[in-house]
Image: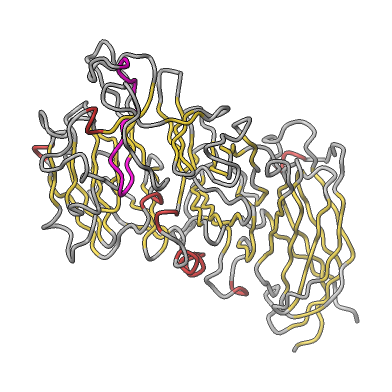
């Protein structure tokens, strides 16, 4: 007597994201073993990421088409917001048109003598004024470079302190204000900066790496007057640990060393700055990996991507490893990177944290809508978009630095080119690990991908020698019964829900299923996978 056909369904495939750490056959069906150029959407489906398009209409000749935009920062300026960028050891302003900017001398009568040898800037912004005429100021720092101020320049040849020319530009901090006591214009070269609690905070990893400097309250250019000063972490950081980055969260000031973290309370009244908590043996290895999500701070440590999550009731900061499910692969890739070139961003609109590794050319995408049961985040990998920098603008657009261009995360091609969406399940045994399974049919419910060709693949017993078939998705709207169960309201009119089945073949004890597609202008998400098998002999 023939065995009955057995059916298994995977709803919301890939909902838990990648898991490359645990035994593949023991994983829940919600995990994925491959998830390239994917995101987890707000309904828990795995789907294609967006692509990118150019923002600047032409390549700036000082940047050149071969050189990437490696830094971006936005100065909010009463609706006339200014994007500052850097590449090819040059500074630029603007988006649709990138304008080259030089560093001006103290009275703006000419260019200052200033050499730029890298693009690893960090920006911070703090407005300054007398209450009647408050004007925005941006502060740019980079190891080995004198700090810069981007602000409204003085009238050419006029009083250097009358910044009212109507033209924004760069000057050195020494020409605009005052440096910390004991420093000259040639030896204060901070590597990190933060605007928080009404001040600019800086640290100089190549000078005194265990001291943080803070400006006068409400004047980020003055590091000598008023209540400006410094904070020594010499007695806090052991083993000559150095300040890599500074962050602020929930009323605390956080100093990240390479191997330790110090949390200070009362940063508004600097006379009352006190050490709130010291976290040893965990630090930040890449300055630009730090992102504040509003409720948390995320950063890259030498043990993975960490979450510094404050529990208000206990006044403590327990840490969570959000990269737990991809940890070993991530750390192997990080080991081949230059730390200063690792970039990250938190994009609130899509609720993901991106970590870009330029050497391996991978971007790890972590969905931050809510943690999994073990505290980790749902992870996917983007393997061909290759951003060199990130910026979320005041208008809530995500910009990415590309060779010759500022790109915008938008649409569903990579500047007109297709990109490959790839998803594979974990291996599963239908709760019968020693019994052979004979494939009869396979079915998918997908959303989007109008007229695109998808490749459905499956394989047995851990072999990558897949059996496959291709399917061209419908190119006209399909009206299915009970369509609300598929949550397609997020899509605009004309998006298709396509259900298809195909005869399948092959046999084995464990099964893996995948779907691949070239994304060419239309998003694609997987709603459900159905598998029909007959059970064979015990093996």
Image quadrant in which the C terminus is located: bottom right
Q: Nearer the viewer, residue 488 or 62?
A: 62
- Which quadrant of the view contains residue 278? bottom left
Magenta stretch: dominant secondary structure:
loop
Image quadrant in which the N terminus is located: bottom right
438 relative position to 335: left or right:
right
| Magenta region | 141-156
Q: Residue at x 56, y 68 (%)?
A: 20
Where is residue 87 shown, x and y percent of the image?
Answer: 48, 42
Furthest-bottom residue in this view: 539
- Which quadrant of the view contains residue 511? bottom right
Q: Residue at x 25, y 18 (%)?
A: 129
- Which quadrant of the view contains residue 149? top left
Where is residue 343 shown, x and y percent of the image?
Answer: 45, 50
Q: Is residue 434 above or below residue 190?
A: below
Total number of numbered discs in the rendering: 0
Q: Nearer the viewer, residue 345 or 538?
A: 345
Q: Is residue 151 magenta?
A: yes
Where is residue 217 shown, x and y percent of the image?
Answer: 18, 28
14 relative position to 249: left or right:
right
Q: Residue at x 15, y 42 (%)?
A: 183
Where is residue 502 shown, x and y percent of the image?
Answer: 88, 61
Q: Is residue 207 magenta?
A: no
Q: Nearer the viewer, residue 194 or 403?
A: 403
Q: Is residue 46 above or below residue 108?
A: below
Q: What's the coloring here?
A: secondary structure
């Amino acid at each position: 007597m023939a065995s009955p056909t057995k059916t298994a369904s995977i709803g919301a495939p890939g909902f838990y994201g990648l898991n490359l750490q645990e035994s593949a056959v023991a994983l829940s069906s919600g995990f994925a073993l491959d998830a390239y150029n994917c995101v987890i959407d707000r309904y828990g489906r795995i789907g294609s990421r967006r692509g990118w398009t150019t923002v600047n209409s032409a390549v700036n000749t000082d940047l050149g088409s071969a050189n990437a935009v490696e830094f971006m920062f936005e100065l909010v300026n009463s609706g006339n917001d200014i994007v500052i960028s850097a590449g090819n050891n040059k500074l630029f302003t603007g988006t649709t048109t990138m304008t080259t900017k030089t560093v001006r001398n103290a009275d703006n009568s000419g260019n200052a003598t200033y050499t730029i040898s890298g693009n690893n800037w960090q920006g911070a912004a703090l407005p300054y004024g007398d209450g009647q005429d408050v004007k925005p100021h941006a502060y740019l720092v980079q190891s080995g470079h004198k700090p810069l101020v981007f602000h409204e320049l003085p009238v050419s040849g006029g009083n250097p302190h009358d910044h009212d020319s109507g033209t924004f530009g760069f000057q050195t901090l020494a020409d605009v204000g005052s440096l910390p006591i004991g420093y000259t214009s040639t030896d204060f070269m901070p590597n990190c900066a933060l605007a928080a609690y009404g001040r600019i905070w800086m640290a100089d990893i190549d000078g005194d790496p265990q001291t943080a400097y803070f400006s006068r309250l409400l004047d980020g250019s003055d590091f000598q007057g008023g209540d400006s000063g410094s904070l020594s972490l010499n007695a806090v950081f052991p083993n000559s640990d150095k300040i890599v980055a500074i962050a602020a969260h929930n009323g605390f000031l956080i100093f990240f060393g390479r191997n330790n973290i110090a949390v200070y309370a009362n940063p508004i009244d600097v006379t009352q700055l006190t050490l709130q908590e010291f976290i040893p043996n965990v630090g930040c290895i890449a300055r630009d990996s730090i992102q504040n999500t509003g409720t948390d701070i995320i950063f890259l440590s030498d043990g993975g991507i960490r979450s510094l999550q404050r529990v208000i009731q206990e006044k403590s900061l327990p840490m969570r490893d959000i990269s737990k499910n991809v940890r070993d692969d991530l750390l192997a890739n990080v080991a081949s990177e230059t730390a200063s070139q690792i970039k990250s961003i938190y994009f609130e609109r899509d609720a993901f944290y991106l970590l870009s590794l330029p050497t391996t050319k991978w971007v790890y995408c972590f969905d931050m809508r809510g943690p999994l049961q073990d505290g980790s985040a749902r992870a996917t990998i983007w393997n061909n978009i290759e951003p060199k920098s990130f910026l979320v603008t005041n208008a809530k657009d995500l910009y990415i630095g590309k060779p010759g261009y500022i790109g915008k995360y938008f649409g569903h091609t990579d500047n007109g080119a297709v990109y490959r969406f790839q998803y594979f399940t974990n291996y599963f045994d239908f709760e019968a690990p020693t019994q052979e399974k004979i494939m009869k049919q396979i079915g998918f419910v997908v959303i989007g991908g109008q007229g695109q060709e998808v490749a459905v693949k499956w394989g047995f017993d851990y072999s990558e020698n897949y059996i496959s078939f291709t399917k061209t998705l419908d190119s006209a709207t399909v009206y299915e019964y009970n369509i609300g169960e598929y949550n397609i309201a997020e899509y605009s009119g004309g998006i298709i829900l396509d259900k298809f089945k195909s005869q399948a073949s092959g046999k084995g004890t464990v099964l893996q299923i995948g779907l691949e597609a070239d994304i060419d202008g239309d998003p694609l998400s997987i709603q459900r996978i159905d598998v029909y098998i007959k059970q064979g002999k015990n093996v």
